[in-house]
Structure formats: structure tokens, C-alpha cells
Image (spheres, grey):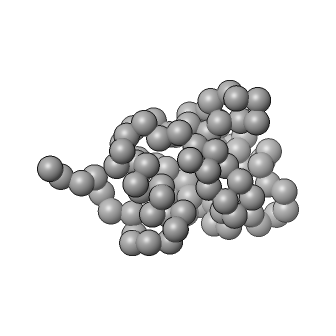
Amino acid sequence: MKLYNIKDTEEFFKVVDQCKGTVELVSTQGDRLNLKSQLTKYITITNLFTDESMINELELVAYDPDDATRLMQYMFGTDKYPGPTTP
């Protein structure tokens, strides 16, 4: 999935931290980096800013369906990223 125009990186990483599974950033070279890693967060913030306030585009892979839902809700600004669904 791709996310666009991330203006609040702190809020974005809070959502990633709420994910229970692995969330990976896919680089333009096809490398996959675990976004729950502090080092990856630092690299993402320093390398992907095209201006001082916004990340224009990220490609992510979320392996848990609840995490994918949480990230999509963040992207579309719906709800406040509820916890996992229960069967």
C-alpha cells in the first residue's frame, strides 16, 4: 500500500507502533525495512523529507490484516485507529 502526504510524522509513527505485526517500508530499490526499528525510523525521517514538514509518498507492507486496516484508516483520516478486531 502507498501512503501520501504524511504531514505529521510523529502521529504516523504512533500508528505504526500500535501495529501488532511487522510493517515494512519498501525503498525505491525494492529493499524492505522494518518501520518498528528505531534506526529505520531515523533513516526514514532524514531521507524521505522533500521539504521540512511532509513525506510525499511511502510504500508499506503490513502483514497483519488489522494493521493494514489501521494504516488505511490513518491514511484516509477515518476513526482513531481502533485496536484489533475480535471475531
Residue at figure coordinates x 14%, y 50% from the top left: 87
Q: Is residue 71 above or below residue 73?
A: above
Q: Position of residue 43 (x, y in %)?
A: 72, 40
Farthest front residue?
1
Tell me: 75 left or right of 51.
left
Residue at figure coordinates x 49%, y 63% from the top left: 74
Farthest left residue?
87
Q: Position of residue 38 (x, y in %)?
A: 59, 39
Q: Foreground: 14 or 21?
A: 21
Locate residue 33: give its quadrant.
Answer: top right
Q: Foreground: 69 or 49?
A: 69
**Residue 61 in view:** yes
Q: Foreground: 9 or 84?
A: 84
How many numbered marks are there?
Answer: 0
Q: Position of residue 14 (x, y in %)?
A: 49, 57
Residue at figure coordinates x 40%, y 48% from the top left: 67
